[in-house]
Image (spheres, rainbow, N blue to C red):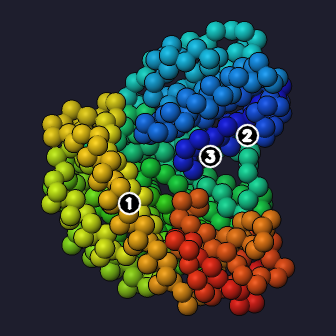
């Protein structure tokens, strides 16, 4: 039986899909890249914000059309939207033949065979997955299940490596902990084993992903375990670059800042989840910080690594956000000089504390504020890219099919941080690492010219 996995959302979902693919392949399923050629289509959905939910539903509907126009016998929803809404999603979307939750993953092969055979799957009733583990990390079990087999679905030189799953924070705008559960670190040996396997698959950059990478190790009794693991991962034969995602500013430690900046093979790249800069708004979000502390952190980073890449996300229009709060955010963004900033308008999320707050701004006002901050960010990030002209960067080539090779420098994360085009490049192909000097910029994207130094 053939199966196609369609993955939406973040890099954590990509890992989940590859783990599902590994289970299915081990149980005799034939993996195909095109949903139109599959007997079964599995859509790994995203349930983070309204736009992602709509995209997930639209993808499921499009996949269901293949039952009329292609060979598909069943369309199955998995992932965050499926886990978060369970039986409610099944009732509202009969076009999907089944909705499977995270607890179905270990038995995914049996589930799919039963669904194709015409058996009715009883969808789960969603629950707060944080209740599945003790809230206190010290009380959690210190053993993990056997490593899940993984089958790569992409062939590029970068691959995500999941550090942990879940989150223990209680941000008032975020529903992720409810459906992803409490924070659980993966064992160091499992990470190293998977890193070596990825290197054997041709991967040269590891992208470490989790809901909160700064928490890695706290449930294993060592809150500084990430500082220990980064040099070990970077030393894996075949791996040339290790990149860490999603760092919580309130939890980041001076030792971690230094380790990221100074460890050979680790990208001087800081994905900092600021979300806002106004202390009042951050308190209502149940987060911590202010412009002074955030700018102090950025100053510390640039003391260790002046050319470090920095990205963040901010939420605009949070309940109770005043004009002064918005101005505080804008002034911070001007001073921060970040390479990339994602700007999101606030929207209520089911089951979150912020959804119950007073002081909601109307949709038109939120839209206007998003447009204002987005325009400022576009100008600031373009200026920051221009400042990069003259810097020497090392570019991992990811596309050699166009007029010039295109890849990413250490300061650029996958998919969302821009790219670097290599002018006058000769003989470079996907997977090569090329030293180059930045000669121009186009928005957040860079243009660089190779110096002749490269590794294959």
Q: Nearer the viewer, mark 3 or mark 1?
A: 1
Q: SS class of the residue under badge 2?
A: helix
State the residue in front, 127 or 282. Answer: 282
Q: Quadrant of residue 213?
A: bottom left
Disc with the residue nearer the chain's start (2 vs 1): 2
Does the CB distance between marks 3 and 2 fall below 8 Å?
no
User: Badges 2 and 1: C-beta atoms under 8 Å apart?
Assistant: no
> Disc 3 versus disc 2: distance between alpha carbons?
12 Å
Q: Disc number at residue 115? A: none
Name the residue rendered at 39%, 73% in the picture. 380
Mark nearer the viewer, 2 or 1: 1
* Residue of label 2: 22
**Residues at marks 3 and 1, CA–CA distance in whole angstroms:** 28 Å
The quadrant in which residue 440 appears is bottom right
In-image side of 337 versus 418 (left or right)? left
For mark 3, what is the residue? 14
Q: Compared to 387, does 201 lie above or below?
A: above
Q: Which residue is mark 1?
A: 374
Answer whether labels 3 and 1 touch (C-beta < 8 Å): no
Whether residue 134 appears in this view of the structure is: no
* Image: 378 above or below 276: below
């Amino acid at each position: 039986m053939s199966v196609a996995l369609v993955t939406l959302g973040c890099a954590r979902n990509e890992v989940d899909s590859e783990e599902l693919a590994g289970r299915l392949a081990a149980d005799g399923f034939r993996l195909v890249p095109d949903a139109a050629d599959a007997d079964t289509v599995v859509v790994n959905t995203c349930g983070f914000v309204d736009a992602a939910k709509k995209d997930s539903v639209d993808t499921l509907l499009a996949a269901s059309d293949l039952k009329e126009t292609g060979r598909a016998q069943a369309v199955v929803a998995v992932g965050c939207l499926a886990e978060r809404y369970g039986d409610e999603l099944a009732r509202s979307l009969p076009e999907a033949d089944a909705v499977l939750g995270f607890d179905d993953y270990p038995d995914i092969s049996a589930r799919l065979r039963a669904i194709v055979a015409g058996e009715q799957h009883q969808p789960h009733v969603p629950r707060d997955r944080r209740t599945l583990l003790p809230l206190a990390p010290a009380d959690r079990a210190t053993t993990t299940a056997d490593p899940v087999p993984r089958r790569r679905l992409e062939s590029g030189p970068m691959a995500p490596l999941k550090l942990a799953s879940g989150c223990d924070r209680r941000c008032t705008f975020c529903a992720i902990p409810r459906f992803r559960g409490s924070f659980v670190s993966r064992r160091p040996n499992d990470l190293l084993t998977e890193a070596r396997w990825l290197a054997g698959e041709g991967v040269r950059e590891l992208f470490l992903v989790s809901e909160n990478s700064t928490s890695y190790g706290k449930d294993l009794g060592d809150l500084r375990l990430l500082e220990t693991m980064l040099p070990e991962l970077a030393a894996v034969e075949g791996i040339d670059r290790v990149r860490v995602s999603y760092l919580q500013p309130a939890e980041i430690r001076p030792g971690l800042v230094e380790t990221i900046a100074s460890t050979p093979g680790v990208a001087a790249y800081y994905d900092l989840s600021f979300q806002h800069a106004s202390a009042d708004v951050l308190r209502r979000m149940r987060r911590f910080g202010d412009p002074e502390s955030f700018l102090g952190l950025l100053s510390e980073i640039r003391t260790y690594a002046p050319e470090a890449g920095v990205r963040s996300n901010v939420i605009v229009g949070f309940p109770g956000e005043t004009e002064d709060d918005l101005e505080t955010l804008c002034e911070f963004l001007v001073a921060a000089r970040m390479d990339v900033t994602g700007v999101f308008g606030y929207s209520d999320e089911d089951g979150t504390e912020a959804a119950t707050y007073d002081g909601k701004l109307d949709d038109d006002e939120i839209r206007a504020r998003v447009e204002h901050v987005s325009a400022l960010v576009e100008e600031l990030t373009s200026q920051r890219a221009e400042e990069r002209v003259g810097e020497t960067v090392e570019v991992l080539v990811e596309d050699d099919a166009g007029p010039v090779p295109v890849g990413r420098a250490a300061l650029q994360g996958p998919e969302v941080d821009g790219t670097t085009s290599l002018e006058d490049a000769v003989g470079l192909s996907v997977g090569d690492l090329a030293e180059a000097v930045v000669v121009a910029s186009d928005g957040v994207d860079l243009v660089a010219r190779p110096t002749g130094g490269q590794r294959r």
